[in-house]
Image: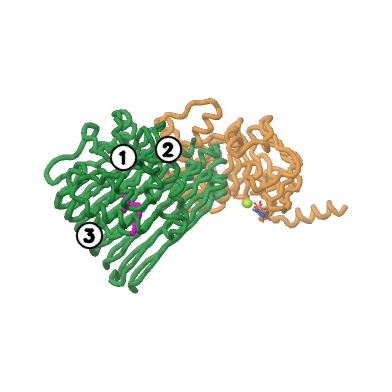
Amino acid sequence: MLTIKNLHAEVEGKKILKGINLEINKGETHAIMGPNGSGKSSLASVLAGRDNYTVTEGEVWFNGKNLLELSPEDRAREGVFLAFQYPVEIPGVSNLNFLKTALNEIRTYKGLPPLEAKEFLKLTKEKQQLVDFHSNLMNRSLNEGFSGGEKKRNEIFQLAMLDPQLAILDETDSGLDIDALRIVSNGVNKLRDAEKSFVVITHYQRLLEYIIPDFVHVLYNGRIIKTGTKELALELEERGYDWLKEELHLKESV
Amino acid sequence: MTLPFYQALTADVTALSAQLPLAADNLQDIRRSALERFKAIGLPTLKTEEWRFTNIQRYLKEFPYELQQTPVAVSADTVAAAAIPGLDCYRAVLVNGHLQTELSELPAGKGIIIGALSAHTTAPGFTTWFNEQPHLAEAVLAQLNTALFADGLYIELAANTVLDKPLHLVNVYTSNSPAFVQPRHLWILNRSAAATIIESTVHPDSQAVTFANSVLETVVMDNAELWHYNVQLGAANFREVHTTATHQHKDSRYHHFNFTLPSTPFTRNNLSVALKGSHTETNLKGFYLANQHQHVDNHTFMDHIMPDCYSNELYKGVLLDNANAVFTGKILVHQEAQKTNAFQQNNNLLLGDKADINSQPQLEIYADDVKCSHGFTAGQFSEESMFYLRSRGIGEDAAKALMVNAFSHDITSEVNVPELQQQLQAQIAGIMNN
Ligand SMILES: Nc1ncnc2c1ncn2[C@@H]1O[C@H](COP(=O)(O)OP(=O)(O)O)[C@@H](O)[C@H]1O
Ligand SMILES: [Mg+2]
């Protein structure tokens, strides 16, 4: 579904991604871990099409399409979804109106008619329950005055509404207490199926106890330096990242 | 012998008054002294302080406008096109300032006087209040209007009279040859009266160019409340100077909303409020969305003459393409006007490559125990917000439309007529999605 080949990207002249290679197949869940500042959010941003990043080398293919040539909205319409680490607040844009617009723009792209008001409301109700998203937040301005946890739930609620093929969750667990974490993870698990893939960016092994990944990658200094299974996450939790960095220096000095 | 319009305006008074038989009404003295005053002040140039950023002469010189128009028939369809969907309201239709009773649905009943201004020049309300608003004397185009106006709408609500439905005033401007039209209105709300009046402008396209120089005086007496909406849609061949001069008396409330949307190329709004009593509330809200080469100038003057009054002014603008806007917000707090609360804010989104705003607060405060503030911003959309919306599949134009809608929300959400609010939001979204 997604193939990233030797991806290099920079922001404001600073090299951030330095040759990422990653292959994600249908139905797989990949976790990406790594110390702060290693480039995890940057990778997510480049995939979603944030334009302050410049791709200097490499390719990204999504279902046979050259992802890097698409506008951010077309990437979303093709089925890429990014749950932001820091969702923005947009005063004056109602949550409901925003979602309706997004859903209908995606449907138009796919040649589908806009959803009838009734169907839309039904879908909204159903998906709200999935992440226990309070309906009184729906009529409020997008994320305005939401708590950290409410913002994160809103991201997953949007994910459920827009039903993408590939969802990238950037530190969705940060700012969530353990109950909220369980609810959000359960919601994500209910969305998982053989057709959908997930990239879960996190600092914490505990999230991966709920959302069990098929692969765990360690991103460090703009590169994936190690790939393993969920046991790798446990090992990272116990030992930190230093041993990996040392391994890397040893390899590089050889 | 007729002089071309612009030369007629700048020639001496006798020449102008000679070629314009002044209406044979009881206002000859007022008209003559207004004409003298107009000549004494002279047409504004870019050197005139109040007109530094607005070149009116360019538009006055544009055509050999006619000062008097032959009546043009207006169809019910033209009027229907201006309707506010779903709104149950009264309707007053004015064509070039002349009331068309057959196209109107005027309120009637005890305490309500409404009709052509020309038919009420001897009414006690008229003789007390006409041309009395103190700021008009300095407004040169208002003087021209006073000298030469033909007609307009007179409304007087007796004490305790509440208009049970909004009144929609449809100003139709149309002519077969370039016309300089000068409507004149006077609205009086006596003690504890209340009304909502929605004014909108229709200029059926493909007609000759019309320049409207309209003046409205409103008098809001003790404890009365007026909600006045002015919705300016206009057309490419319309130009407008719109002067609204208000007196507010003790305990009264006045809410003025001004919406300027495409596509009149030249709009100048003079809005001034003189406070004649204490404990008043004044809300001045403006929203302008301009495109192409539109020029929108909002000139406001909040005159705090009396103590213990509150005024709040918020003007927001979205400028696309080469659109150009001017905002001048004068607040004068007299020495006697202690405990004044006066706030002013002007926020702009500059979205066109050549879009521009000149914003000037003018605060003159002579009282010491007051709360006054003003602020100005001009900027673009937040990139973060745009990216967030686009990352959800919302195209760039639709995202901009959402953001503009959000930006206008502070103003539109305060519109107390839901049908008008919806129409405005739809119009704003329509312009952005175009
Ligand atoms: N807009 C930006 N301008 C300059 N540097 C940036 C910008 N965004 C991110 N960076 C830098 O890129 C590096 C990677 O950041 P990020 O992708 O956020 O890491 P992570 O998500 O792994 O913590 C950091 O050094 C950060 O300072
Ligand atoms: Mg990050």
Q: CA separation, marks 1 and 3?
A: 36 Å
Q: Earlier in the sequence, mark 2 or mark 3?
A: 2
Residue type pointed to by label 1: Gln
Foreground of the two, A16 or B333: B333
| Position above or below: B291 against B133 | above
Q: Earlier in the sequence, mark 1 or mark 3?
A: 1
Foreground of the two, B175 or B370: B175
Residue type pointed to by label 3: His
Chain A shade in the render = orange
**Secondary structure under the numbered disc 3 in the rendered image:** loop
| Position above or below: B276 against A107 | below
Q: CA separation, marks 1 and 2?
A: 18 Å
Pinpoint residue B344: horizontal percent, then vertical percent. 39, 60
Residue type pointed to by label 2: Asn
Pair 2/3: label in front = 2
Q: Chain of mark 1?
A: B
Instruction: Name the residue at the bottom extreme.
Output: B368
Q: Are marks 1 and 3 on the same chain?
A: yes
Residue sitting at x 68%, y 44%: A216
Q: Residues within 10 Å of mark 1 (few under 14, many from 20)?
A: some
When asked about the image quadrant of residue A200, the answer is top right
Q: Are marks 1 and 2 on the same chain?
A: yes
In the image, is B126 to the left or to the right of A112? Answer: left
- Answer whether residue A13 is magenta in the image: no
Q: Is residue A184 visible?
A: no
The region drawn magenta spans B138-144
Residue sitting at x 32%, y 34%: B85
Q: Which residue is mark 1?
A: B68
Pinpoint residue A38: horizontal percent, then vertical percent. 69, 53
Q: Residues within 10 Å of mark 2 (few under 14, many from 20)?
A: some
**Secondary structure under the numbered disc 1 in the rendered image:** loop
